[in-house]
Image (cartoon, grey):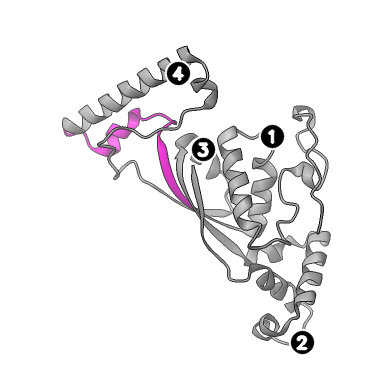
Amino acid sequence: MQVELLYHTPDPERAIATAARLCYAPVGASELMETMPEERVKSVLTTIMASGHFSTLEHASFTFAIDGVSRALTHQLVRHRLASFNQQSQRYVKFQEGLPYVKPRSIAEIPEADDLFEDIMDAVSATYARMLELGIPAEDARFILPNAVETKIVTTMNARELLHFFEVRCCNRAQWEIRELAHQMLALVKPVAPFIFMDAGASCVRMGCSEGKMTCGDPYPKVVRN
């Protein structure tokens, strides 16, 4: 898995604070953006995060390039509706040098399961290649491809949706691959907007576990504020 932060709103925390402060300021947003002291920015952000006035967080967005993940992961990722996605197309991209795929560790650690997995992936790869040779369009040949096949996707989320994404996908109960993705994305945005994402993560970071009877039973360590 390779995850890169391609682009983000310049100075996202100042942009968010400007949008929030505009509601109560006699001057325009451009003047606030340029003149608001840094301590005022932090004060406004503190109020936002404490009050739950999270609509202002939607003014900062973050774009990620995500490579080397499975279609099983992206099927979950695109359920986050307040986001934008562009994914490598199996309709137009032909896998002519073998199928790249993701193998779960649980399979790799059991020799018999690993052999079964490799056998079926080899069979699928050979069948897919033969279909292309027979003139079957890639958009039809792809019907035999499994969830394990690697894909690439570009994803954009605003800060508010990212907080929600981290809340549900950093959780120990999230599927392992998307959980790893969430933690990598969180590590990339924290340096860019350290105040907003200071205690981002699974729901138990800021509150009790939201999983009810499905809780993992492992309390998440509280983040110490600097």
Label of residue 172 in the image: 1
Q: Considering the numbered disc 3 on the image, is that residue within a helix, a strand or a loop?
A: helix
Q: Amino acid at mark 3?
A: Leu
Whether 193 is drawn above or below 107: the answer is: below
Q: Comparing marks 4 and 3, which lies closer to the viewer?
A: 4
- The residue carrying mark 4 is 114
Q: Residues within 10 Å of mark 1 (few under 14, many from 20)?
A: some
Please report whichever mark, 3 or 1, sits nearer to the chain's N-terminal start.
3
Which of discs 1 and 2 lies nearer the camera? The answer is 1
Q: Which residue is mark 2?
A: 26
Label 3, label 2: how far apart the Cα atoms are: 47 Å
Label 3: which residue? 73
> Label 3 crowding class (10 Å Cα cut-off): few <14, some 14-19, many 20+?
some
Q: Quadrant of the rendered structure where residue 178 is? A: top right
Image height check: is 20 above or below 205? below
Q: Earlier in the sequence, mark 4 or mark 1?
A: 4
71 sits left or right of 35 in the view: left
Lower sequence index among marks 3 and 2? 2
Amino acid type of the residue that numbered disc 4 sits on in the rendered structure: Asp
Label whose residue precedes the other's in the sequence (1 or 2): 2
> Tag 4: Cα neighbours inside 10 Å, few (<14), some, or many (≥20)?
some
**Earlier along the polypeptide chain: callout 4 or callout 3?**
3
